[in-house]
Amino acid sequence: MRWTFLARRLGFYLAAAAAAIGLNFLLPRLMPGDPSSAIVEELERVSGQQVPAETLLSIRAIFGNPHANLAQQFADYLRQLSHGDLGVSVVNFPVPVADLVWQALPWTLLLVGTTTITAFAIGTLLGVVAGWKAGSRLDAILTPFTTFLSSVPYFWVALLALWIFGFVLGWTPLSGGYDADLPQGFSLAYAVSVLHHGVLPAATIVFSAFGGWLLGMRNMTVTTVREDYVLLAQAKGLSPKRVMLRYAARNAMLPSFTGFAMALGGVVGGALLTEIVFSYPGIGYLLYESLQKRDYPMMQGVFLLITLAVLLANLVADLAYVLLDPRIRARG
Amino acid sequence: MRSRRRVLAVVGAVLLAGCSGPAVKPGSSGGAANASIVYAKTDGGTTFVRNYNVMGPATDKAPNMELVYEPLMRVDYGDGGVLKPWLAASWTFSEQGKQLTIKLRTDVTWSDGQKFSADDVVYSLGLPIEKPDFSIAGVTYKSVAKVDDSTVKVVFAEPSYATLNQFANILLPMVPKHIWSTQNLNTWTNPDPIGTGPFTLKEFKPQQITLQARTDYWGGKLPMSTYKIIPTSADALKAQLLKGDIDWSSASWPNGEKEYVAKDPDKHLYQLYSNGGAMSVLFNTAKAPFDDVHVRRALALTIDRTAVVTTLQRPGTEAGPTGLSDQLFADWLDPAYKGKVQKVDATAAKAELARGGWTIENGALVKDGKRYQPSILFNSDWGWGNYADILLNTWKQTLGLQVKGAGQPSAGYYDKQNLGQFDLAAASTGGSGVYGVYRFLSSSFKVPIGKSATLNQGRWSDPQTDRIIAAMERTDNVGELKGLGRQLQKIVVDDVPFSPIYNNFYFVDINATRWTGWPTPDNFDHIPFVGMGPDTILTMLKLQRRGS
């Protein structure tokens, strides 16, 4: 029973991944404008000179002609992918996209990964407590406060934090992801500088994100508390803590958990605003730049990574559901 | 945008209340031996890419490659944009401007110790011809040949006195033949660049590049030992400048005089240098109603330039009617147009419309029973919406004309502009030298609407303009060029192919706590703007460590 369930889910995810690769190939080609003329325009803007027609032709020769046969382009694309080759970045010619992605990915995973987990943990925990005793003093303070928090634009929070903690108090650096005067590598000093540079961006993300988890969890807990099985558990005389965590929270968490899986998958997309404000070396800016400059290979590389990460996260969530929710196991 | 303004206001208050002159980071104190200068780049993203394939078609190369690779000439922006020697010591035209003989400096070496010679120049100038995809500087010559070790000959198809500035383009730098000719330029990222410039690459990290000053640079000895480039955001930059974490940057700072300079006028420098360009309204002269000079004049007469620069928080930067800035073209401007800014003149504008037989009915231009409701194309990525609104409002108030705003992100903006799919466009105009500013008006760049034009997007076509531009290409006599330049100014003012709104500038932010000797806009013979190549180098050569 469990194995057919697993096989069916895996099949679905494989199909989804195939569709994602297809869409990933197609979508940038449906956008207006083509990258070779974008390069020519940028070159003309930079040089203030007219670029000869031959340049356009040879740029197309290097990066592929967007007007070529679509099937042919797709076949080329798949052949490249099967070699793990994401192509050459247009705006950074001749630097491979994979190099750019690998340079940015660890920073993004570190910052956005840890903050997503932290925000989820804090928000969910506080949400259970607030929802368990809805109307209590804690709930009366926490809930309106987080509603307010989640309506404050992130950009504002980040800038203000930078000014107060970075400039006025001078506790944290004003930009960058590490102390560039230190040699990069596994040394204590370097690790400390990474933490020192990361703490403020991380704090702003957690600060802006945990409210959403809290509110969702609180509201779900409020409804779950009134369910019969919770009452039954209480009637059985189980300890309130056990009822709250094992009975109410475990069920209330299911929707939050789906959201969490999605958020984890989205981690590789980076955090653009954070990266802009704190000059953090992550993948968000890479994606932003590739979109702006119609850098197809870079766009596709990052999109592919995000799609696959989201799919993987969903798969893991699906499997975890089996453990969390007995009803799924029963239905198989 | 709005929330950003609010933040700045709060921040300003915090600054005024909380801190009386933030302490300057001690940095690397001590002798000149470890003296470093720090430049913060705000427009390069959050990381840099180690790509010194400087002639390749990448648009985002490693920053400040122009401190390693140098061009043959430099544009003197302090002097109307004329060309001055750099790696070239001198040059002469012959064959009525179709042949250029360039004499090279003989005291230049590559940073690996090899001598810079005519072979390198022939190779570098020849690359764009042999590999058209490397022709990013848009060269116009047909061939290059070596005459002797320090002389090269460049041949053009047309008289080309006026196109000399291609040799000052930082996108056409001199590269060492002995290294470059052995590489596959389509895959090589040139990670360890060898150039003639004053710096070599010492260390590359995605968030900090350290360049090492050469001790054998032909141009002289630099006062600093290293030059560091770090990426930052425009908002963090302000804090970093105030704190003294960085020495130098190039970002525009609306209200910079109050928020920065006023706090320490001696050390906090915020400077503007005209770059010879302007933000203008471009008329699509290939279609009605803007093929009619009366309509163009009427609209140009009712642009509130002062309101736009006030919104920009850049007082005094309104463009004159010629589009040539007073700061740069003092000797070239017709005295009649000097220091002149067009004021909003509703009466004159209405008279112009009447002269052309136009009326305005229900917000539309009407002539012979035909109604035209124009729209203005602008780049929404540049935040130009605010300024377009000022234009729309003034036209409505003074003429009763309702122009529609058509904002587009960069991609769509360029497409529409180049294809001629607009009535009015808010566009950048300008170039180096009078010829450079006006060259785009030549009808040789004109293509039909629907076909992509890279210059002359307004599809201006005027035999008189063409004659003057051609004459400028056929002479290097300064007196004659000035005369021709004035004729072009008159055409621009009277026939209005485009109407300038405000001048564009190089913005320079300096914290002179560690380094002094910076040029100022009232006294400069080179611009202290990073990215200008030779000008940046000249600036650095003249700096002094404060207190030494």
Image (spheres, coloured by chain):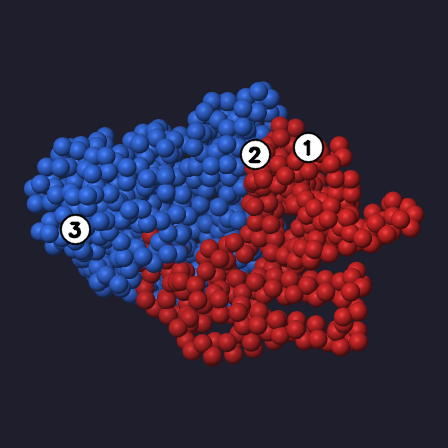
Quarter of the image for the N terminus of chain A: give it: bottom right
The amino acid type, in three-letter code, at marker 3 is Arg
Q: Residue at the location (76% across, 70% down)?
A: A331
Q: Is residue B89 above or below residue B154?
A: above
Residue in the foreground of this view, choosing between A156 and A97: A156
Rendered location of residue B278, percent (x, y):
30, 42
Q: Secondary structure at mark 2?
A: helix
Look at chain B in the picture and name its colour.
blue
Residue A63 visible, this orientation: yes
Badge 2, how many Cα within 10 Å: few under 14, some, many 20+? many
Mark number displayed over residue B240: 2
The amino acid type, in three-letter code, at marker 2 is Gln
**Mark nearer the N terminus (3 vs 2):** 2
The Cα atoms of the two marked residues, 3 and 2, are separated by 55 Å
Q: Residue at the location (73% across, 76% down)?
A: A7
- Do tags 1 and 3 sit on the same chain? no
Mark number displayed over residue B371: 3
Residue B212 visible, this orientation: no
